[in-house]
């Protein structure tokens, strides 16, 4: 009798070391969230990429010299795809937290039996998924217009994952920090977009000279774009293994910071 009473005793529900059901449910919620507005989250970045290609093709045409041994438009495509991956991974996590805070439904994340690590990784993985979906879709569409080689598909995948993970973590931090949409717009317009544009998306950084070239070596966005481009063209401006190491370290630092800030309740708990 005592055994039966103990078995059905009301108390704290116990999960394993990881609440996999809760983790997967929150991740699935994040994925479904951006798929519900797929025109805005998936089609729009592809249209932006095609507009960039059209503008540069019409403005420069065949007058531009080859870059890294390839036509300029071929050189441009991987950089544009990497830029879309980064910006969309950032947008997914940052908008998810920002909207939850503004609408007051952040409690839907705080109250369930999910640890800080489970919430952090679920949201970041959702951002990575959106970045990779946009990247894969952009690759498929761009192949209809420009024949881009695939020199090392392994590096395309690795740098796509590292880049989307880095920006998803950065978006997580920005989403916690921002108190209104103006704050989020400031981060996007003054940090994410400039770093994306000035990190070798449209040019080889070997064209830069002096201190500007040196500063570029400390920009993780550059290593994302350069490594991603290497996967397509087989040519890069830097050592891809060094770039992988830098991005891995940056990811570990940012993900750890995301975990600590969320566990502390930074700007989400009274």
Image (tube, rainbow, N blue to C red):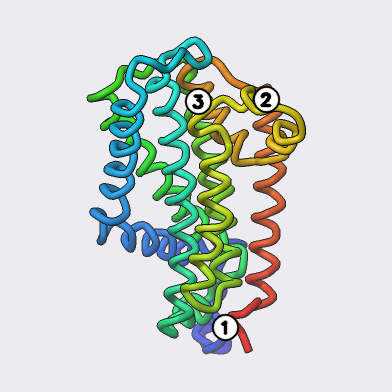
In this rendering, the answer to whether 202 lies above or below 14 is above
Residue at the disc numbered 2: 241
C-alpha gap between disc 3 and disc 1: 51 Å
Q: How many marks?
A: 3
**Neighbourhood count class around disc 2 (C-alpha, 10 Å): few under 14, some 14–19, many 20 upward:** few
Q: In the image, residue 204 lies at what x, y percent?
A: 57, 25
Q: Residue at x 42, y 43 (%)?
A: 84
Q: Are marks 2 and 3 in contact (CB under 8 Å)?
A: no
Left or right: residue 193 compared with residue 245 = left
**Neighbourhood count class around disc 3 (C-alpha, 10 Å): few under 14, some 14–19, many 20 upward:** many
Which element is circle 1 on?
loop
Q: In the image, residue 201 lies at what x, y percent?
A: 50, 34
Observer-nearest of 19 and 61: 61
Left or right: residue 106 compared with residue 36 = right
Counting residues from the start of the chain, the first of labels 2 and 3 encountered is 3
In this rendering, the answer to whether 209 lies above or below 252 is above
Counting residues from the start of the chain, the first of labels 2 and 1 encountered is 1
Circle on res. 12 = 1
**Neighbourhood count class around disc 1 (C-alpha, 10 Å): few under 14, some 14–19, many 20 upward:** few
* Foreground disc of the pair 2, 1: 2
Which element is circle 2 on?
helix
Which element is circle 3 on?
helix
C-alpha gap between disc 2 and disc 1: 47 Å
Residue at the disc numbered 3: 229
């Amino acid at each position: 009798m005592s055994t039966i009473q103990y078995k059905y005793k009301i108390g704290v529900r116990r999960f394993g070391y990881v609440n996999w059901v809760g983790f997967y449910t929150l991740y699935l919620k994040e994925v479904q969230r951006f798929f519900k507005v797929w025109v805005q989250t998936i089609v729009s970045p592809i249209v932006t990429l095609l507009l960039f290609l059209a503008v540069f093709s019409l403005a420069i045409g065949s007058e531009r010299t080859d870059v890294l041994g390839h036509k300029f438009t071929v050189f441009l495509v991987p950089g544009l795809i990497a830029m879309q991956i980064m910006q969309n991974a950032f947008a997914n996590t940052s908008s998810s937290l920002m909207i939850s805070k503004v609408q007051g439904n952040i409690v839907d994340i705080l109250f369930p039996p999910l640890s800080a690590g489970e919430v952090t990784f679920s949201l970041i993985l959702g951002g990575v998924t959106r970045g990779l979906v946009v990247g894969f879709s952009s690759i498929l569409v761009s192949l209809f217009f420009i024949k881009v080689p695939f020199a090392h598909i392994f590096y395309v995948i690795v740098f796509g994952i590292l880049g989307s993970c880095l920006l998803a973590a950065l978006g997580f931090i920005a989403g916690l920090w921002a108190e209104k949409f103006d704050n989020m717009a400031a981060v996007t317009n003054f940090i994410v977009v400039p770093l994306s544009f000035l990190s070798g998306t449209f040019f080889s950084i070997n064209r830069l000279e002096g201190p500007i070239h040196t500063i570029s070596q400390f920009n993780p966005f550059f290593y994302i774009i350069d490594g991603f481009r290497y996967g397509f063209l087989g040519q890069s401006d830097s050592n891809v293994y060094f770039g992988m190491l830098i991005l891995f370290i940056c990811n570990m630092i940012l993900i750890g910071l995301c975990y600590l800030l969320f566990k502390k309740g930074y700007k989400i708990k009274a």
